[in-house]
Image: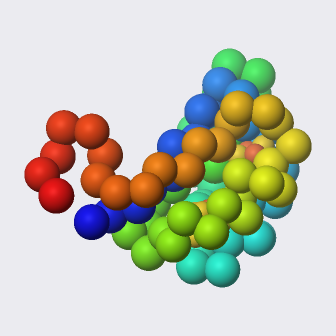
């Protein structure tokens, strides 16, 4: 079973708070810019413990959603 986080690139302002707060270093800043010109954060690790720290610290409502278990459409 793999937990994962989805970051909405259209809402992220690239503040890095989620990156700094994640105890498992699951999130990093991507190299692409979103439509607002911000370098947005990307989830990139299978080490997520669903602690929710990234979700709670993110100042943008709806930019981060945390999911327990496998992404839809994949076998568990
Ligand atoms: S839920 Fe916790 S472990 Fe998972 S990406 Fe967010 S801060 Fe990191
Ligand atoms: S805390 Fe939210 S706005 Fe800031 S980099 Fe992470 S996802 Fe983007």
Question: Which quadrant is home to the N terminus?
Answer: bottom left
Relative horizontal placement of residue 40, taking residue 32 as reference (left or right): right
- Who's the residue at 67% across and 71% down the image? 22
Residue at the farthest top position: 35
| Residue 32 falls left or right of residue 60 | left
Q: Is residue 66 above or below residue 25?
A: above
Q: Which residue is situated farthest in the left direction here? A: 75
Q: How many numbered circles does the render carry?
A: 0
Asked whether residue 28 is in view, the answer is: yes
Residue placed at 44% from the left, 75% from the top?
A: 47
Q: Residue furthest right?
A: 59
Percent coordinates x, y for residue 55 in the rendering: 71, 52
Residue 45 percent location from the top left of the image: 43, 67
| Viewer-closest of 37 and 14 | 14
Quadrant where the image shows the C terminus: bottom left
Question: Which residue is located at x 76 percent, y 71 percent?
Answer: 21
Identify which residue, 42 or 50, lies in the foreground. 50
Q: Quadrant of residue 60?
A: top right
Please determine whether, in this image, residue 11 is positioned above or below residue 58. above
Q: Residue at x 59, y 43 (%)?
A: 65
- Colouring rule applied to residues: rainbow
Residue 19 image-quadrant placement: bottom right
- Using the image as rendered, state which of residue 38 and residue 11 is in the foreground: 11
Q: Is residue 10 left or right of residue 17?
A: left
Give x and y (percent) for residue 42: 55, 50
Residue 16 in view here: no
């Amino acid at each position: 079973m793999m937990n994962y986080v989805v970051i909405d690139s259209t809402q992220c302002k690239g503040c890095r708070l989620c990156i700094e707060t994640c105890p498992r270093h699951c999130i990093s800043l991507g190299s692409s810019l979103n439509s607002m010109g911000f370098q947005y954060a990307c989830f990139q690790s299978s080490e997520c413990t669903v602690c929710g720290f990234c979700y709670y610290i993110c100042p943008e409502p709806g930019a981060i959603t945390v999911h327990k278990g496998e992404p839809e459409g994949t076998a568990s």
